[in-house]
Amino acid sequence: MKTLLASAIATGLMATTALAGEITTRTMTFENEGATMSGTLYLPAGYEAGDKLPTIVVTGAWTTVQQQMPAAYARQMAERGFAAFTFDFRGWGQSGDLPQSIRFKEDPTAKTDDIRAAIRFVSTLPEVDATQINGLGICASAGYMVDAVSGNPLVRSVGLVAPWLQNEAIVNAVYGGEEGVAGLIEVSRSAEAAGGEIIPAAGPEGAEGVLMPIGGYYYEPTRGAIPEYDNQWNQASWEGWLTYHPADNAQRLDKPLAVVHSEAAAIPQGVQAFLDGYLGDATLQMLEDVTQFDFYDNPDDVTRAADTVAEHFRANGAS
C-alpha cells in the first residue's frame, strides 16, 4: 500500500463547482428486508431533467440520522456538481424497524446491508449515472461503507471522513480494557434477552445513564441535537459493536480510497492500522487540530474534507 498525500485543491477543481443557485432535494423511499427506508436525493443547482450525474452515497456517525452530518456532506457534494444520496438506517429516524420491531440498535451487519440496498436503489434513479456511484462514510459508518462497497460492482470509489476504524486493541483501550468490554457485552446480552433496553444517546458532560455524557455536537440544539435526531441507544448494540473490527480487514477493499482525518480526532491509530492492511494506493489527508465533532459541522473543516474527497472521486472517473 502506498499512501499519497492529498494535494492542495487546484483552481480548476473549484471551477467545476456547481453554479450558484439552489440545491434541490427529493425525498424518496426504498425497501430493504421488508422495511421501508427514508432517503433524500440532493441535486446540484442547474440540474436539468435527463442529466445523469456521478453520485455519492453518504452515511454518518453512530446513532445519527440523515439530517445531521450526512446532509452537510451531501450538500457539499452537490455544490461540487455531484448528486448525493442520504438515508436513515433501519431502526433510526424515519425508516422502518429492524426485525422484531427493534429500533436504535447500532448493528454493523444490518447497517452494511442497508448501505448496499441504498446503492442498488440509487443505481436505478434516472438522475444517476449508474457507472459513477461512489461511497462516503463518516465516523462509525466508515467501516460499514468499506464493507458495503468491497466487491460491489456498482461502486467506483470510496472516501472516508473522520473514520472510526477499530480493532480489538483499540476497543479495549477505549472501553475499559478486557474487563470493561466483557461487562458491556453482558449488558448487551441482557438487553437482547429483554427485547431491548433504550437509554439516551447524548447528554451533558458527566451525566449518568447516557451513552455519550460529553455534551458537544450531539447535545447542542444548534449543532447535532436537531428535532429529527432520535437521541436513543439500544443497549443490545454493545456486543455487535465491540466485536466489530474493521481496522483488521482492509485487504478486502478493492476500490480506490481517500481518507481525511486528524491526530486530534478519534482513534487516528485505527486509520494507520487500516492503511497498513490496504492493498491499493490511498490518498490520505491529515488536517491539523481538527476534532471529531469539527468534522461533523465546522464549516471550514467540512469544506476542506469535502474538497479532498471530491477531488478523489473526480480522479477516479466521477466527472
Image (tube, rainbow, N blue to C red):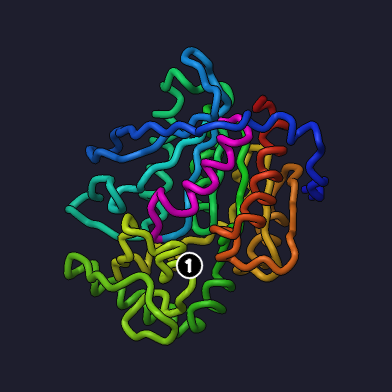
Q: What residue is shown with label 1?
A: 217
Check if residue 64 falls in the magenta segment.
yes
Q: Check the image and report above or below for 44 versus 282.
A: above
> What residue lies at 17% left-to-right and 53% top-to-bottom?
100
Residue 66, percent across and down? Answer: 40, 48
Looking at the image, can residue 2 be seen? no
Looking at the image, can residue 38 be seen? yes
Which segment did they paint magenta?
A: 63-82
Residue 314, percent across and down? Answer: 70, 31
Q: Relative to the observer, which residue lies in front, 23 or 36? A: 23
| SS label for mark 1 | helix
Residue furthest to the top in view is: 50
Q: Relative to the observer, which residue lies in front, 36 or 226? A: 226
> What residue lies at 57% left-to-right and 21% top-to-bottom?
131
Q: Residues within 10 Å of mark 1 (few under 14, many from 20)?
A: some
Residue 192, percent across and down? Answer: 24, 67
> What residue lies at 62% left-to-right and 53% top-to-bottom?
302
